[in-house]
Image: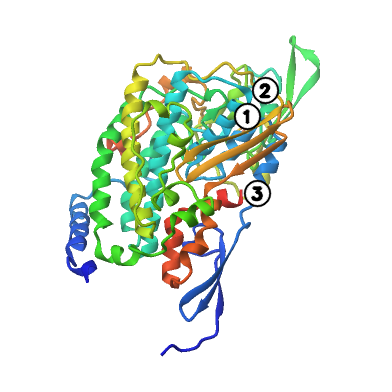
Amino acid sequence: MSKFDRFGLGLAKGLALTGKTLLSRPNITVQYPEQRLDVSRRLRGPELVWVALKCTGCATCAKSCPQGSIELATSQELVDNKYEVVEFLVDHGRCMFCGLCVEACPFDALYMGRGYERAAYRRGDLVLPKEKLQMSADRQPSAYCRPEMEAELPLQTLLVYGQTRAKR
Amino acid sequence: MAIRTQPVSINIGPQHPSTHGVFRLRVTFDGEVIIGLEPIFGYLHRGKEKLAEARTYTQFIPITDRADYLASMSNNWGYCLAVERLAGIELPERAEYIRVLVGEMMRISNHLMAVGFFLNDCGAFFTPLLYMYREREKLLDLFDMLCGQRLNYNYMRIGGVSQDLPVEFLPALKKFVQEMPGYIDEYEQLLTTNEILLARSKGVGVLSPEQAVNASVSGPVLRACGVEWDIRRADPYSIYPQLEFDIPTGIQGDTYDRFYLRIQEMRQSVRILQQAITGIEQLPHGVYRAHVLSLVRPPKGEVYSRIESPKGELGYYIVSDGGVSPWRCRMRGPSQLNLTALRDMVLGWKLADLIIILGSIDIVMGEVDR
Ligand code: SF4
Ligand code: SF4
């Protein structure tokens, strides 16, 4: 019987907390497409961003990729005293966004992206050639492994500080 | 007068909401009482150990994330520590502190999930879990700030960590550490003295210390049986010898003890975090990685090293032939070995108890099947 001699007390304690939370209405849920969070400055988001001008075609990124999702080819002859990158393909369907390629690139030519909402209907649409990997308005690089870029990006919204949407 | 019934076998899973992943149990019942249990693993087998043999040492780190995906930082740590021991790499002090910080954050976040889902299995449908998700979300925000993803961190590297802490990190973590004890009190207020929970879990699924040790159980499940065994003390690594913390133990080894022990462990983790924050503030910025060649080639040999992951003893056994990738890499997943003790716990209990006993072990199938 000892198990039940205080019956109701623990239950009431729990319900008191639930009631308190109900009345204080903590603001946590984000109404997603209308409200958005500022993502992490180091976001390893889809998709990779590639800067043609800086890339030397050294293939360090392709070698460091655990999934083998980067494929590149350079020209056979020197063009302007440098080998031209004729092909740079990233299969984002195989990529696991680990960031090892970005970390390995010695010329800061490859960045992780800051974007999201990159779903595609076909697997083939996830394989991006070099024209589509370039920086553009909706393809911004993140500061992952590029600490010098960190200060320029907006601060991440943090729930610890009670922030639940981007400050705009 | 007992009614004689025929034993009935029932398959629970592989896709059952209370099996915590793709896990199948073939249970034999006599009436409603369990008289036999056969766990069937392997639905999530991805051949990680074999994948390691085809990758360089660094390339395997993101794949360890996917083993125990609720505590991927600890997986990173266990693996990196094994390779560092094999190659004899010394870490800078700041890297050790960062690792302890993220390791203990990971423990809190994992225990929040474990406790929340346990209560969920008990029938407190999602209300307590969402309280715990609130704090877990704060931790995931911090992890996101650190390494850019919320679940698969890939943050540690052989010889340190991939990037230094951002400047905003420590103030935010400090605020979290300050508030966390209050939140843990809230969780206790919600359910630890709840009569229904006590009736459901006290004395249910008892595992004796002998059975536990016999089955190589580790982590909170072992400590709940009253065995004081924590790798952080028993086989110290990193800077744990310098830190002060207690090892909570249970009394009976029942389901309730396993649940309550995790809440106590969260308090200890908060204590460790406080000390580690004080420690790291005195260290210079920027030295977060030892100088290691990008293609690590440990000398010929083998190593077994273990850490206390939130779920138990996470060990990595690596054999190197001097090349760029491991010749053999074996993971000792704590969930898997804890799961082997399930039969000892459930025999003689009923179907509804099976669900909460399974919930109290805190398994992640990614680690069981690998
Ligand atoms: S992020 Fe990782 S998986 Fe993706 S291309 Fe880079 S190295 Fe390969
Ligand atoms: S590592 Fe950098 S510079 Fe070299 S090929 Fe890849 S993107 Fe280009």
Residue at image position (31%, 34%) is B271
How far is the residue under mark 1 from the one under mark 2? 8 Å
In the rendered structure, are the residues bearing label 1 and label 3 in contact, judged by CB atoms less than 8 Å apart?
no
Q: Is residue B205 above or below residue B51?
A: below
In the rendered structure, are the residues bearing label 1 and label 2 in contact, judged by CB atoms less than 8 Å apart?
yes
Dot 1 or dot 2: first in sequence order is 1
Question: The residue tagged with tag 2: helix, strand or loop?
Answer: loop
Query: Which of the labelled discs sits on residue B46, or is there none?
Result: 3
Q: How many C-alpha atoms fall within 10 Å of the one at disc 3: few (<14), some, or many (≥20)?
A: some
Image position of A8 (left or right of A81)? left
Q: Nearer the viewer, residue A149 or A118?
A: A149
Q: Quadrant of the N terminus of chain B?
A: bottom left
Q: Which residue is mark 2?
A: B295
In which of the image's four quarters is ligand 1 placed?
top right
Q: How many C-alpha atoms fall within 10 Å of the one at disc 1: few (<14), some, or many (≥20)?
A: many
Question: Which quarter of the figure has residue B27?
Answer: bottom right
